Amino acid sequence: MARRERVMRMSVEQPLWRALTGYRVLTMLYAIGLFATKYDDFPRPRVAIAYFVLLSVWTLATLPRVANAASCTRRFLAADLAIALLGIVLTPVADAHDRIVAGGPTLPSIWTAGSVLAFAVKGGWRWAAFASTLVGLANIVERRAPSHDTVHNVLLVWVASIAIGYVVEVARASERTLARALEIEAATRERERLARDIHDSVLQVLAMVQRRGSAMGGEAAELGRLAGEQEVALRTLVSGGLVPVSRVSEDASQGALVHAVDEPDGDPFGAGGGGPVDLRALLAPHATARVTLSEPGAPVLLEPAAARELAAAVSAALDNVDRHAGDGARAWILVEDEPDAVIVTVRDDGPGIPEGRLTQAEGEGRLGVALSIRGRLRDLGGTAELISVPGQGTEVELRVPRPHP
C-alpha cells in the first residue's frame, strides 16, 4: 500500500473551552462564597439560597456542554444566559436596596461573564455583542439607574467579550488556512511521488518500446510511434499534476544499465515498521559488466523508506546513463558510509550534459532528474548534486543524512 500523507488538524478553540469550563466552576464557588460572607446583610436570604442551588446544579450538570463547540448548542447558550439574567434580576429581591446602590455585587457576580464568553467562543464577536448587551441592560435595570460604576462594568464586559469573539474568528480563519495549506502540501508531495513512480516504470517502458520499434521497422515501427505518442501525453499529465494513481511493474531491457530491484512484500516504503535495511543489498543488482559497484565491507544501514528511495534514485541515474551516454558507456557506483550521512556517487564516462539541457528537459516534461532524483532526495532531507562537463561524463552525488540519535 502506498504511503499517504496525513494532515494533522489542530484546534485553537479547545483550550478556550477547557478554560471556560474551569472558569464557570471557580466563579460559581466565588459567588457562593461571597454570599456566605455577607449572609447576615441579606434581608431575604432564602431567595439567594434558592438561586444558588439552581446555579450550582446547572453549572455542574452542564460542564460537558462547554467541553467543545459541538455540544455547546444555541439552546444551551440561551438557557445559560437566562440563568445569568435571572440572578441579576433577583438581586434586588434578595439584597437590600442600599447595598445595591452602593455598588454591591449581583447574585451570580462574575459567573455571568462565563455565559457571555461562551457566546463569544461559540459564535464570534456578534454573538458576544448580543449576550453582553443583554447582561448590560439587566445590570442597569437591577441598579435602577446607570451609575458610573455600572456603566464602567457593562462597557468592560461588552468590549472584552467582543474582542475575544473577534480573536476567535481570526483564529478559526487562520486554522482553516493552515489546514488547507497542509492539505495542498500533502497532495503535492503525493503527486510528486506518484510522478516519480510513473517515470521509473511506465515512461521507461514506453520509451524502450519506441526505440526498439523504430529499430525493428515494419509494424513494430508503428507500435513504437504509438508508444512515443503515449509517452509524450503521459509526460504532459505528469508535469501538469494530473497523475492517475497507478503503479506498473518495471521491466528492464537486455543489456541496459538499470535492473529491477525486488522489494519484499508489504509496504515498499517501510511505513509499516521494521528495522534498518542494508543499502548494499538494494544496490547489488545494478552491478554488471558495464556498472562497477564499490561499497564498504560493513553493512550500510538505513531506514527502509530512506534506503529504497535512495536505491530508486540510483536506478534513475543509471537509466539516464543508459539512455543518454551511449551503448558503450560505463558507470561506477561508489557508496560511502559516514557518521552523519550516506553518500552514493554515480559516475559515467559518457559525453556529459550540455549546458541548459536539464532546464530544457524539465520544460518538455522530462522530469527524470527533477523528480526521480532530486525530488526523492529532497523528501528524505538530503541533496542531489549533478556535475557534468561536456566530453568528460557526468557525476551525480546523492547524500542522505542520518537521523540524530
Image (cartoon, grey):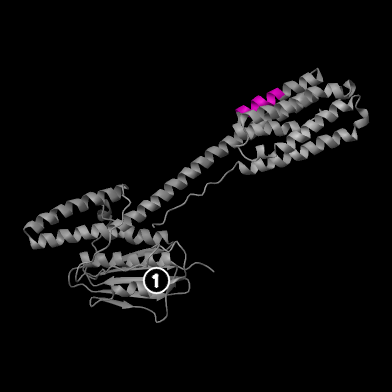
Taking depth in this image into account, of 49 and 9 the one nearest to the observer is: 49
Q: In which image quadrant can residue 56 be found?
A: top right
Instruction: For the C terminus, give its image quadrant.
Output: bottom right
Q: Amino acid at mark 1?
A: Ile
Q: Which residue is mark 1?
A: 343
Please tell me whether residue 361 belongs to the stretch shown in magenta.
no
Q: Is residue 370 visible?
A: no
Q: Is residue 182 visible?
A: yes
Please tell me whether residue 127 belongs to the stretch shown in magenta.
yes
Side of 80 relative to 270 (left or right)? right
- The chief SS type of the magenta part is helix
Residue extending furthest toward the left: 218
Q: Position of residue 196 (x, y in %)?
A: 32, 57
Q: In which image quadrant can residue 48 be found?
A: top right
The residue lying at 71 percent from left, 34 percent from top is 114
Residue extending furthest toward the right: 40
Q: Which residues are magenta?
A: 126-134
The residue lying at 81 percent from left, 32 percent from top is 52
The residue lying at 67 percent from left, 33 percent from top is 117
